[in-house]
Image: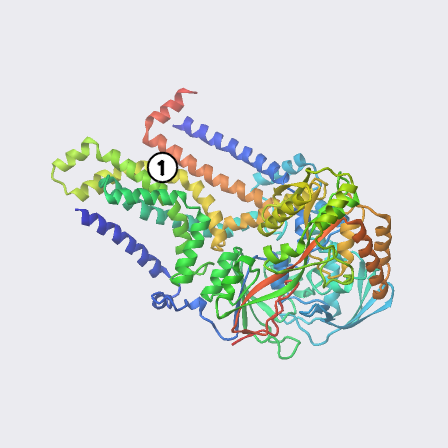
Amino acid sequence: MKKKVGITACSALLVLAAAIGGCSSKPADTGTQANPQSKTEAQAPAKNELTLGVNGDPHSWDPIDTFLLDWSTVATSVFEGLVERTTDLKIQPGLAESWEFKDDKTLQFKLRQGVTFHNGEPFNAEAVKFTFDRLLGEEGKKGPQQANYASIDRVEVVDEFTVNMILKEKDPVLITKLAGYGGVIVPPKYYKEKGDEYFNTHPVGTGPFKMDSYEKDNKVVLVKNENYWKKGQPKLEKVTFRFIPEATTRLAEMQTGAIDIMKKVEISQTESIKGMSDLELMQVGSPTVYSIRFNTSMKPVDNVKVREAIAYAIDADLIIETLLGGYGKRVNSFQSDMSFGYDPNLPLRNYDPEKAKQLLAEAGVKEGTELDLFLPGTDATFKEVAQAIEMQLGQVGLKVKLNLVDASTFTSDLIPNGKAGHMYRNGWGGWTLDFDNTAYLMYHKGEFWNPDFYDEKVEELLKAERSTFDQEKRLAAFKELNQRLYELVPDVPLYQTINLWAVNKRVKGFQPPADERIDLREASVE
Amino acid sequence: MAAFLIRRLLHSVFVVLAITLVIFVLVRMTGDPVSIMFQAGEPTKEAITELRKNLGLDEPVHVQFGLYLKDMFTGNFGTSFRTGESVIDMMKEKMGATLLLAFGGMFVALLIAIPVGIISAVYRGSVADFFGRIFSLLGISFPNFWLGIMLIIIFAVKLGWFPASGYEGLEYLVLPSVALGLILSGILARLVRSSMLEVMNQQYINTARSKGIKEWLVIIKHGLRNALIPTVTFIGLQFGTLLGGTVIIEQVFSWPGIGRMLIDAISQRDFPVIQGSVIILSFLMIFVNLLVDISYGFIDPRIRQGGGKSE
């Protein structure tokens, strides 16, 4: 009797196994599953095909709708702008062969000839005009991109391959903006025929790859654009981006060989990757910088001596070395060293607890004074950094209270309303790789993320930097600005992050991008 | 019965309205979607204000709510801030994957819980019962996030039996279903065990035995059938828990369902998607509860009569 119950249970399990096996959509799998070493059909490495595991789905492919890094990660292969950025971040001609300022308000582009969109539509001056009319008009209002191109008044067609961009005001970073995001060129005929909603999921550009299929939250498959204007590129036949939000799952997929490149490796995962002979850990400096920002209207951090003391009391080198596993770089201002305007000669405030104590005493700050430090609760790495800061400030007599809050509430509500305590984590990307936007939005009075800081000299320098196209003059203004900010200490720059990637060694010619815009034109698979 | 049904339906409508209001207000208290839309960008204050206006977020909350309710009654749950796609279409697209996973989880749970529960009850106090109870306890105690990752490491990375993530065919359903089902199977196995114990002590079981019916037939036909009544009710009530569980499991296994859509929408503060999907999910939950209530009414006339008296 007992046996029979057991048999019934076992049979039920077998039925399940058979049902699952029998229902498999891939007949080839059944033979391979018995052997742990073999890969399923979907995972079998195929020549000239590459699969990447990235963390997020772009959701909307329309360039004017989005400002997500997840978009640029994939869409860089589909869309192109008038200019482009090389993997070492230099600006070079893209769909425009050359450009020049005819006068202060007229920027003329000579367009590349013989380029076609993926649907066969020709790329020409009309396409450029259509793209910017759309971006700057009613349709552009639904997304965040319009704001970036506010300095453009209109685009005029000069002839089939020449356009004039008429500017409302000087915008020294306009050229860098045109290298991506909202300024990429879209096909007018296709867009008008298919409509907005269709374009959102079936994008067409001039890029090296065209979209083959897209399954939201699952994957996007791109295939080679045979008519790509750059001869000999791309080398790959097919590229699949799989959207895998969990880093642990991405690593598992890397280990099973289901993906060849993994984006966003966590520091805790580096040892596992180093331990696998077929994988390579690649690192690239990112434009993202973290700092501790002060609410300069709150006592006692309204006193510059207190802010300076805190800067001396934090041992950023130790934090980078121990908590970040060395994957971070010291910075002397709130920008990465790849940003135009970074001054490598500006000194760092190195760890000096004695000096910190002395400054606190001069400022009359009593031992045990309590300070709030706000940070987003989801940032596990920075939570450890904050704990280290709590301990280090404790050593100079300051008591830090850590406040972990929801990430979105933190950036969209607490910071702009000056409710993020005496100090908070400030993280910033700086997509134009020019200090202009960062500096302006962080230190110009009344900006969204600057509820309290104000300095007349800073305002003057910001104005000076924006009023000229002369890069020498701008650099001089930035140098002075960096110096002024160094003295005022509105924040303590901690480190520039380093992004980690895992790459299968069979992939050749892949360079991880600093700005997350993956360029696969030179990539190939052995 | 008609009065009972009408009362339950009115009750459901009230609950839906209450949920709509709570979700609408709560979502708006969690921060501003516009500043988050500029993830990689550096918007000026003017740009943020302008986009907020374009999305209708500058209106007072009660005006926004009025407009939303009006649309909702015509079946329009709004469009995503990020994609411009209608929330209903997004839900339709994702619902299949989520339900498939929920049913897969339930299937695994039943497949494990019923034999484990029966064996535990029939051999009460034995080694099998001991392990059965330990198993239930483990099932209840495991966080499903951790369990999911462990299954990936063992069955995808080490053994290579199943794919680790994504959704291409039915073999992709196995690991997430097991992760989801294992948790539920712990609770279910306990329930099956205690119901079986209760049933097996009933007089009619002894009567069946005394008729000389084979023991396994007594257990399955007379015991299990009766013990399943509370189990089925419990499953109905667990539907919500199951959908909740899929949120985490979908994230771990990159399963393209509603759970992941909701997590993304929350992190991006895509208000229409959060509101719409929570409201539609609560419709579903209320509907399932309504079915359970109605079936109670049919099974147990006392519930129906008790309800009738209060009017």
Q: What residue would you read off at disc 1?
A: B233
Number of disc labels: 1
In the image, B14 versus A126, the foreground residue is B14
The answer to which image quadrant residue B231 occupies is top left
* Residue A74 location (% of width, % of height): 60, 63
| Position of residue B104 measured from the top left corner of the image (x, y, whole percent) | 39, 50
Front-most of residues B241 and A162:
B241
Residue at x 47%, y 67% (from the top left corner): A257
- Relative height, residue A135 to residue A125 (above, below): above
Q: Residue at x 15, y 33 (%)?
A: B207
**Lateral position of residue B1 relative to residue B277, left or right:** left
Q: Is residue A448 visible?
A: no
B84 versus B123 height, above or below: below
Whether residue B194 is situated above or below residue A112 in the rendered picture: above
Chain bearing mark 1 = B
The outermost residue toward the bottom is A232
Viewer-side residue, B242 vs A518: A518
- Name the element at disc 1: helix
